[in-house]
Image: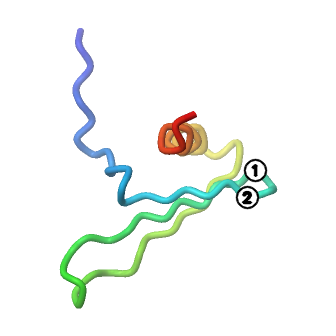
Amino acid sequence: MAAKPDTAVIPDERISIEKRSDESLVVRVRSEGPEGQRLPDAVFSFRCGDPQYSYWLGRLKHIAGT
């Protein structure tokens, strides 16, 4: 059975991921829309052991090209 494409993936150009010295990840997702109507960025943090940590670590490696 072929895997379905993930239509919910956030484009790389809207994401910034920072890996901190304590190995936690800070993920910032830039909002879309007209300049005057744009919502603030969404910011999340994940630590090793969090359910989404490995997903965002993989995205960081993909964005960084490693």
Picture quadrant where residue 40 is located: bottom left
Mark 1 and mark 2 in contact? Answer it, CB < 8 Å: yes
Dot 2 falls on a residue whose secondary structure is loop
Q: Nearer the viewer, residue 62 or 44?
A: 62
Q: Which residue is painted at 49% across and 65% down in the image?
A: 28
Amino acid type of the residue that numbered disc 1 sits on in the rendered structure:
Glu
Give above or below for 36 relative to 19.
below
Q: Residues within 10 Å of mark 2 (few under 14, many from 20)?
A: few
Coloring applied to the structure: rainbow
Q: Which residue is painted at 22% across and 87% down in the image?
A: 37
- Give how far across and how far down residue 48 sits, in percent: 71, 44
Picture quadrant where residue 2 is located: top left
What residue occupies the far left of the structure in this picture? 34
Left or right relative to 21: residue 16 = left
What residue occupies the far right of the structure in this picture? 22
Q: Which residue is mark 1?
A: 23
What residue occupies the far front of the structure in this picture? 65
Quadrant in which the N terminus is drawn:
top left
Give above or below for 50 relative to 25.
above
Q: Nearer the viewer, residue 65 or 38?
A: 65
- Give how far across and how far down residue 10 sits, in percent: 33, 51
- Give how far across and how far down residue 17 sits, in percent: 55, 56
Dot 1 falls on a residue whose secondary structure is loop
Whole-angstrom CA distance, mark 1 to mark 2, is 5 Å
